[in-house]
Amino acid sequence: MWKDVNISLFNKDGNRKLNIALNVLIVIVAAFLIGEILFVTSYTGVYVVDKSMQPTLYGAATKYEAGGDYVYLLKNAKPTYGDIVVVERENDDPLIKRVIALGGDRLKLVDGELFIKYKGKDEFVLVEEPYVLDTNNDKNNHKNTFCNTDEGFFVEDGKVFLMGDNRNVSNDSRDMGAFEQSKVYGVVTDWSLKYKKILSALHKFFAFDVPNGMNCSK
């Protein structure tokens, strides 16, 4: 009799531990799935193509080849000065560039140096750009730009002026004018810039060298 009772208690105790373990596992899986859903809702991966954002970001030769940096965007984030953003274009790949000026600002380039008269201010000020690969170059100085006049280029409200860090090769607002802020898909996160080497290596491993996600050209 006592033997049967001991076996019964053992079975109940074992079942209780198994149930607890299963419940903990279910909670962990549910938390992971919820976190994944929230992450996908807020962030999207970006595969960098071409050289327009060097040395901050290195891009693959084409969107079909491996070798580009992989970073994450915070979708629908409001951009500000210095942010790296992705802007959508109709019938073409999106662009990944840096925010240089916002609505109400005026800017001009003089001998490769950037000057901005911020909204509400009376004078142009020199902007330090440590992220630029080469400040003094022909692309910054050529005459076919939107910001090569004494009064500077005026950025209309609701728009952003974008340039690549590698000014020699970047196609940006100097050629195309300011972009609608509503076309900014998202802002590249600081944490993905900090850990871009790790993220790029993980992406390369799991994608088996085949780029996927949003591809950003020059």
Image (tube, grey):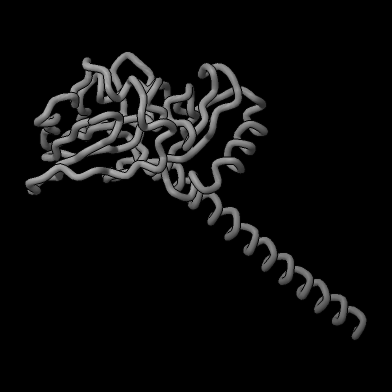
Please provide percent x and percent y for residue 49. Answer: 48, 23
15 or 217: nearer the eye?
217
Q: Quadrant of the C terminus?
A: top left
Q: Quadrant of residue 207?
A: top right
Horizontally, is 52 left or right of 202 in the view?
A: left
Q: Is residue 149 left or right of residue 129?
A: left
Location of residue 171 in the rendering, given as x and y in whole percent from the top left corner: 34, 20
- Front residue (pair 74, 154): 154
The residue at 34%/38% (across/down) is: 186
Can you see residue 41?
no
Which residue is nearer to you in this view: 79 or 4? 79
Rendered position, 147 above or below 5: above
Query: Relative to 56, is 217 above or below?
Result: above
Left/right of residue 173 with respect to residue 55 in the rendered view: left
Q: Is residue 77 visible?
A: yes
Q: Position of residue 213 (x, y in %)?
A: 49, 28
